[in-house]
Amino acid sequence: MDIVVTGIGLISCLGNLHQTWEKILQGESGIKLYQPFRELNPYPLGLIKNQPINLTELTQSIVADALIDAQLTVPLSHCGVVIGSSRGCQGIWEKLAQSNQELELSHWLETLPHQAAIIAARQIKTTYMVQSPMAACGTGLWAIFQGVELIRQGKCQQVIAGAVESPITPLTLAGFKKMGVLAQTGCYPFDRHREGLVLGEGGAVLVLESAKVACRRGAFIYGKILDFGFTCDANHISTPAIDNQMASRAIKKCLERSNLEPTDIDYIQPHGTSTLFNDHREASLIQSLFPSDIPVSSTKGSTGHTLGASGAIAVAITLMALRYQELPPCVGLKNPEFELNFLIESYKAQIKKILCLGFGFGGQNAAITLSF
């Protein structure tokens, strides 16, 4: 069964889906120096507004845009929802912990990590499955995979799937600072002078349907979701395995399930966080599996690293690449450290098959293939 994407909702520090796409093509970045918390130093961040955005507002806006794009109207009582978040409601709980009031919440259950999924389910008025996966920075790809499986298994004909993140909180910044991976000036994926990651907020959701249902209602189709590969190193709480064994297995399994060879891939959207270790590991992984001429670019130099939402945003951007047959540049990259075919500027190309990669704490390895 072919599973297709008929609608996309995306919000990043660059704007909505089309604003983000156009600005990335022009090599722009939404990353700026901010000091949202007085107790912490200024950092380069990918904020949507001048202050961290509310997760409820962000989720509702993204879902509304996806419904408009797919030409669907509420209620969608038979539509599944699979929306994840790696940080979820952490900002809410940090504010509560810092207040002098007793920790009393009349709706405490709604502030747990499944908050975005519940918000979306109520927004579309569904009575069907609602899921909220969490797999660190692999969350977005996991959510899309679970949405595809719900349709393949005949449990839903339509699913809204993706991830939403509002991760810029004092604790998140302090945690990444303690790890020594926060950039001081900006995000430069795969560059010799990269400094580390830049936190960003935002998210993306896709409207997934079987090709049969989409064609029956005359929906516009961005592309097909071919298949996935997922593994876990279980090697360290944060650092992935150096040998790339399980990461390689995830990609090979993804290609096998998609009936593709490495030479069939026209473009790779890597995780590309701009950290010293991850970029080195990922470049080595790509070099070991793919021909050296396959175009590669990370868009985190434009949007920042949106943690759990990063995979969903990457898939949305690559679907735009399929739609317009144009490849986005690796914004922030000036002096590549690795011998890969990095895109310094956008350019038109014939694109049929795309691979997106995502990696997360705990050794999460995720790969997804898309086609025109």
Image: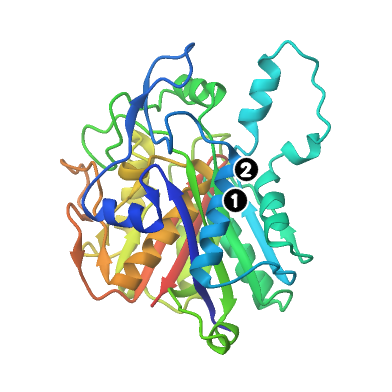
Q: Decide: few, some or many residues near mark 1? Use Cα within 10 Å; few <14, some 14-19, many ≥20.
A: some
Q: Which residue is mark 1?
A: 60
Q: Position of residue 150 (x, y in %)?
A: 68, 70
Q: Is residue 53 above or below residue 225?
A: above
Q: Is residue 117 above or below residue 79?
A: above
Q: In which quarter of the view is residue 372 placed?
A: bottom left
Relative side of 310 to 43, left or right: right
Q: Position of residue 266 (x, y in %)?
A: 29, 70
Q: Which residue occupies 66% across, 52% down?
A: 133
Circle 2: element type? helix
Relative side of 168 to 322, left or right: right
Residue 188 image label: none
Q: Which residue is mark 2?
A: 56
Q: Quadrant of the N terminus?
A: bottom right
Q: Is residue 206 above or below residue 100?
A: below
Q: Decide: few, some or many residues near mark 2? Use Cα within 10 Å; few <14, some 14-19, many ≥20.
A: some
Q: Position of residue 243 (x, y in %)?
A: 43, 46
Q: Position of residue 356 (x, y in %)?
A: 42, 60
Circle 1: element type? helix
Q: Which residue occupies 24% across, 76% down?
A: 350
Kindly identify the amino acid type of the residue bearing the numbered disc 1. Answer: Gln
Q: Which residue occupies 25% across, 67% down?
A: 326
Residue 139 visible: no
Kindly identify the amino acid type of the residue bearing the numbered disc 2. Answer: Thr
Q: Are marks 1 and 2 in contact (CB under 8 Å)?
A: yes
